[in-house]
């Protein structure tokens, strides 16, 4: 069983997107769903909410995204900065979309060194959570994510991995 650390998440409705997006299926989640990364997606931070939503541009918290690389290039303003590492991710069972930069929460066997594991797998160590035996590692190329997760999860020092996905701010009900 995998240990999952989650970021704040909300459900939001999704529209119909173009079929030209490149997709790669990722390993199954605890709920038995798969994840899809849209490699052609564009994600921009729109702090001043200057980019309008449309059939090809959606909102997610302080971010706007499109699965069409060209849709946001015209809309981008000075206040909106593109994060070239961020990509849109979708859960297959729910259609719920989020964004990721390729950060992995890696739960470790008690007493193991996150720095050593990061080094052994050629990953950047971003943060240590020593009280819960977990580290945050950066996968540089999202196309390698499945291979990196497989390698980490077959390492006897690793308990589990979880892709860090941002689903938006929590909404009080």
Image: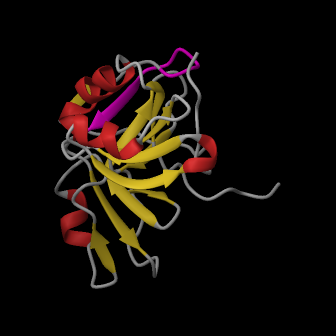
Query: Residue drawn 16% across and 57% down?
Result: 70
Query: Residue drawn 19% across and 34% down?
Result: 143
Please give left or right for residue 27 compared with residue 123 in the image. right
- The vertical placement of 15 against 148, above or below, is below
Is residue 138 or residue 59 the one in the foreground? Answer: 138
- The vertical placement of 39 against 173, above or below, is above
Extreme residue toward the bottom, this view: 78
Q: Main secondary structure of the magenta part?
A: loop
Query: Residue drawn 35% across and 29% down?
Result: 36
Extreme residue toward the front, this view: 111
Please provide percent x and percent y for residue 15: 44, 42
Please provide percent x and percent y for residue 3: 59, 28
Q: Is residue 31 magenta?
A: yes
Please give left or right for residue 20 compared with residue 50 in the image. left
Is residue 84 or residue 120 the one in the foreground? Answer: 120
Quadrant where the N terminus sits is top right
Extreme residue toward the right, this view: 173
Residue range corresponding to the magenta coloring = 29-38
Q: Is residue 136 magenta?
A: no
Residue 23 falls in image quadrant = top left
Query: Residue drawn 52% across and 35% down?
Result: 111
Please give left or right for residue 23 compared with residue 49 in the image. left
Quadrant where the C terminus sits is bottom right
Residue 75 falls in image quadrant = bottom left
Is residue 11 or residue 13 the one in the foreground? Answer: 11
Q: Can residue 19 be seen here?
A: no
Is residue 36 or residue 8 the one in the foreground? Answer: 8
- The vertical placement of 76 against 167, above or below, is below
Please provide percent x and percent y for residue 10: 63, 47
């Amino acid at each position: 069983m995998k240990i999952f650390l989650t970021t704040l998440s909300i459900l939001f409705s999704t529209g119909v997107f173009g079929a030209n997006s490149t997709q790669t299926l990722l390993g199954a989640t605890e709920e038995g769903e798969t994840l899809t990364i849209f490699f052609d997606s564009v994600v921009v931070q729109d702090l001043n909410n200057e980019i309008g939503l449309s059939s090809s541009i959606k909102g997610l918290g302080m971010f706007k995204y499109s699965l069409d690389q060209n849709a946001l290039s015209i809309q981008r303003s000075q206040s909106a900065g593109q994060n070239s590492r961020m990509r849109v991710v979708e859960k297959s069972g729910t259609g719920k979309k989020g964004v990721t930069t390729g950060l992995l929460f890696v739960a470790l066997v008690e007493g193991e060194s996150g720095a050593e594991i990061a080094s052994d797998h050629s990953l950047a160590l971003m943060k240590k959570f020593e009280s819960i035996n977990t580290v945050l590692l950066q996968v540089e190329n999202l196309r390698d994510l499945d291979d990196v997760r497989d390698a980490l999860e077959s390492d006897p020092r690793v308990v589990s991995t979880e892709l860090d996905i941002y689903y938006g701010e929590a909404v009080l009900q």
